[in-house]
Amino acid sequence: MLERYHLSVAKDLIGGRLATDEVQRHLIMSWFENPHSAMKCLESAALVYPLMFAGKLVDTVVTTWKVLPNYSWQAGEDADHCYLAALCLTGNVNLAEQDLLAKCTQTVLKLYMDKSQLSPLIDMCDKDSKMKLLIDALMPPLSLGPVLASSPKPGIPKKGTENDNYPLELRSYIEELEEWSKANKKEATQDALAFWSLKLPAIIVAATTGL
């Protein structure tokens, strides 16, 4: 009943704070009756309410759910992906358990980004902003990791300095090897940049297809 109520009147109620509070109370109480339906309704609320209301609504509801003695992200069974979608669309992914993210990330991405799926985007308010939040939450940018200072590399003493006792042929060979190493490193860097300059646009296009 709660789900039918929400889907039928939510769009007519989004103009007032009291209406948001009313739906908030229904969503909180629905957990005791049916966590599966509660999670689906939470996704519906995330879709149809403007982001300025939806973010706080989902935050309050989920924070309250989490203190209930029977709370579990698995309680909604196959509605767990609806739960994760609601969190991501409203900027509340920080409330998602790691196990929930591991289980449902690919499902949510497929539902919201694959145009061959029966997508819920048709009912979404503030679509662009919410989709950006979802993508940022589930498809974080590639990280190159921290830049570490390179440790000094051993080398042969310069000619004419202390300990300059290397045979001429050995010195020439080592210097040639060092030059080759520098050239090889530079070429590898150029190849990597060329690869990602072609790969990243393809990834972005694939990710945003159907939006």
Image (cartoon, rainbow, N blue to C red):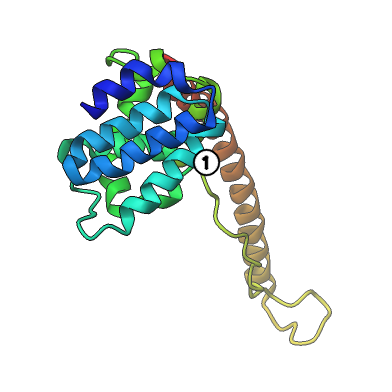
Secondary structure at badge 1 equals loop
Q: Is residue 89 above or below residue 142?
A: above
In this rendered view, identify the residue nearer to me: 153 or 120. Answer: 120
Q: Is residue 79 left or right of residue 59?
A: left
Classify residue 4 by image quadrant.
Answer: top left
Kind of residue at badge 1: Pro
The residue that appears at 32% across and 46% down in the rendered structure is 101
**Circle 1 residues within 10 Å: few <14, some 14–19, many ≥20:** few
| Quadrant (top left/top right/bottom left/bottom right) for the C terminus | top left
Q: Is residue 131 above or below residue 184?
A: above
| Quadrant (top left/top right/bottom left/bottom right) for the N terminus | top left
Residue 15's spot in the image, x, y percent?
A: 54, 22
Residue 113's spot in the image, x, y percent?
A: 38, 22
Residue 56 can be seen, yes or no: yes
Residue 124 can be seen, yes or no: no
Classify residue 69 by image quadrant.
Answer: bottom left
